[in-house]
Amino acid sequence: MSFIIAVLKTRDLGSIKRKLITMYILNVTDIIFTILLVNTGMFLEVNAVMAPFVNNRQLLSIILKVVIPFVLLLGVYKRIKEATEKQLYQSSIIVNGCLIFYGLINVFHIVWSILYIVMKI
């Protein structure tokens, strides 16, 4: 736990880059888990923006969740490279919030996947 707290406290450019990469990976695993769970018929996509894509056009939903965040995070990283110390600190807070959010979403997906598997046994 202290490792996670230490990582969240860091705010240099290198650590923010690693956090952005981690956020991207969590975003990709989110769509993978979402599609797997929705395809069981026992789960629904609650994100109103993504629900029409996940429910009707799963390939497009994967493309949207992989390509658009990649481009956005790349743009954020390019801007952050020129940031002041204060801006790095502020950026780190926002990135940490996103990491926690996506981390929780992935934890929920894992728990729901385990529950589904247990219910099927």
Image: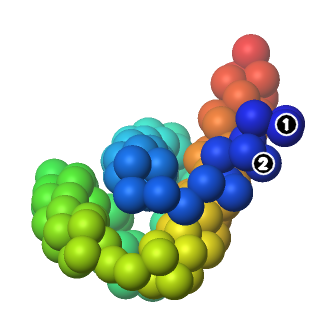
Query: Quarter of the image containing the N terminus?
Result: top right
Q: Residue 121 occupies which quadrant of the picture?
A: top right
Q: Secondary structure at mark 1?
A: loop
Height in image: 86 above or below 104? below
Residue indicated by mark 2 = 5
Q: Amino acid at mark 2?
A: Ile
Q: Residue at x 65, y 37 (%)?
A: 110
Q: Position of residue 67 (x, y in %)?
A: 15, 60
As drawn, 63 above or below 94:
above
Q: Residues within 10 Å of mark 1 (few under 14, many from 20)?
A: few
Q: Which residue is mark 1?
A: 1
Whether residue 8 is visible here, answered yes or no, is: yes
Q: Is residue 31 visible?
A: no
Amino acid beneath label 1: Met
Residue lying farthest right? 1
Q: Are marks 1 and 2 in contact (CB under 8 Å)?
A: yes
Q: How many marks?
A: 2
- The residue lying toward the viewer, choosing from 99 and 64, is 99
